Image (cartoon, grey):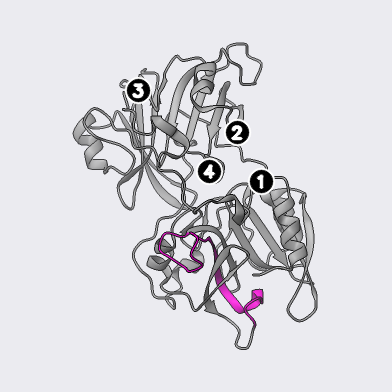
Amino acid sequence: MRRTRKAEAARRNAAPRKAIPPVVLLSLLLALSLAHSACGKKEPDHGGWTDDPIVPGYSVAEIEIGSSFSAVQESHGEPDDRRKEGGYLYAYYRRTREGGGIDDPASWLLVVTLYDQGNGYLDPEDEVGAVEVSSPYAGKTSGGVGIGSTAKDVEGEFGPCPNVSTASSPDGGELLVYSYVDRGVEFVLSEEGKVLTVMVTAYGGLRPAEERSGGVESPEGVFGSHRDDPILPGQSAAGIRIGDEFRTVRELYGDPDVRGSTTEGLVYAAYTGGYGTWKLAVYLEDRDKGGSLDDFDVVVSVSLRFPYAGRTPKGVGIGSLQSDVIREFGAPERQNTAVHQGEQTTILEYNSKGIVFAVRTASAEVVEIDINRAV
């Protein structure tokens, strides 16, 4: 759905507020935040992806925020229409109403907004910034909100909306836009008060196009020169050692994008690289029991995600297979499988060695690694 310039400006000017990462469990079960992987190319008229859950800040329609356009093509094929506007590129799929304009939210089932790499054309490397779905999309949020829900339903799950604006519909009517920028989701409601369109973005919303220079994150990303540091189970990763004080972490990485405390009495520092979900999360013992992050709090766990490229002594890292993990570490001391945010995930715990792996069950690939105190 394309908005009026007034509504677009209001959304961009909203102060971006970072999301709080999941409460830590050293087993990773609650710390893991995953999106949905594409499972082979699907024909546009298959429709199976129209039931995919709506996961604010992460994914919808089997498209991950932050993934490449090539991943969109793999799942959805070539778009039915495309255009460039204001530094963004748009890919339109599944026209649902004949004669409807390109700006009509009721005329497209799926619209993907991408950050242009700089040449004005849709390229495989262009990055997904937002995904919008409209009727007949059937997927829902975890609280059951989807196309056709009411404003009461929306605020019942997400709370009173801090940013409600209006936009003109193509037929001259007025639409209401409920923006939860810090949650990575936006709802467009009809004059009758029913959800017409749902947009999913990263936490903090769609970045202004001018923030990108060349469109590509530096090769080292949030980890800087520590991106390739070895993973030593029970000891260290990304230049951070278990037992380090937070002031040491801050010297390496600066102030965190997000900080807070957990129900387990820990405090945390999360680093996103400036947008999207966290790539590095450090959990610490709250030495003064004040519930806030202080210089002398002590590291008890380091959580790593892509683009971290460090490896264990025998070569296991993000993207390795579950069989590689077992080859190096043997049978896990504890293993469980759970459906988390619509995706089946396997947790492999080696607590006596101080390392835990989260594996995407469908592909058997490692998506997150925790280095913990050995117990």
Numbered disc in front, either 1 or 3: 1
Q: Which mark is residue 277?
A: 4
Query: How much space separates mark 1 and mark 3, taking CA atoms?
Result: 33 Å
- Mark 3, other Cα within 10 Å: few <14 / some 14–19 / many ≥20: many
User: Label 1: which residue?
Assistant: 182
- Which SS class for mark 2? strand
Which of the 4 image quadrants contains residue 171?
bottom right
Pick whichever of labels 2 and 1 is earlier in the sequence. Answer: 1
Query: How much space separates mark 1 and mark 4, taking CA atoms?
Result: 11 Å
User: Label 2: which residue?
Assistant: 258
User: Label 3: which residue?
Assistant: 354
Residue 229 at what x, y percent from top left?
Answer: 34, 28
Residue 85 at what x, y percent from top left?
Answer: 61, 68
Pick whichever of labels 3 and 4 is earlier in the sequence. Answer: 4
The answer to whether 189 is drawn above or below residue 57 in the figure is below
> Please, what is the three-letter code of the amino acid marked with disc 4?
Thr
Q: Quadrant of the C terminus?
A: top left
> Please, what is the three-letter code of the amino acid marked with disc 3?
Gly
Query: How much space separates mark 3 and mark 4, taking CA atoms?
Result: 24 Å
Residue 206 at what x, y percent from top left?
Answer: 61, 54
Query: How much space separates mark 3 and mark 2, taking CA atoms?
Result: 25 Å
